[in-house]
Amino acid sequence: MSATLDADLFRSFFGGAPLVTVPGRTFPVATYHLEDILEATNHIIEEHSRYALRQYDARETVSMWVSTKGGERKRQT
């Protein structure tokens, strides 16, 4: 991730807003994803947890609303 932006583009968007320059240094940024943390900590999500992925049965029916080009809405199962 980065907090860098194009200052001139930003200023022009906001009608020539004043530019303030603050000297500083960059700091390293690390990106972690949930799967990596779970693996590193050996955390196991319980089967019935609301965070667990649900296994879908191919025989389950799913219904949804579908809109046609004419704006008509139909329910499909």
Image (tube, grey):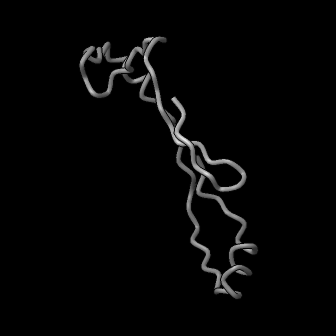
Please provide percent x and percent y for residue 65.
53, 42
In the depicted view, which residue is nearer to us: 51 or 40? 51
Point 46% across, 27% down: residue: 62
Residue at horizontal 71%, vertical 87%?
16
Residue 11, compared with residue 49, is above or below; it is below
- Residue 76 lies, in percent from the top left, at 54, 34
Q: Is residue 31 above or below residue 8?
A: above
List x then y, in percent, for residue 51: 32, 27
Q: Estimate the x, y position of residue 10 in percent, counting from the top left.
A: 69, 74
- Rendered view: 30 above or below 43: below
The total of numbered circles placed on residues is 0
Relative to 60, 8 lies left or right: right
Residue at left 39%, top 24%?
37
- Tell me if residue 36 comes above or below residue 20 in the rendering: above
Name the foreground residue: 29 vs 33: 33
From this viewpoint, is residue 38 visible?
Answer: yes
Residue 29 visible: no
Q: Nearer the viewer, residue 57 or 33?
A: 57
Quarter holding residue 34: top left
Left or right of 56: which side holds 29? right
The residue depicted at 70 percent of the width and 71 percent of the height is: 7
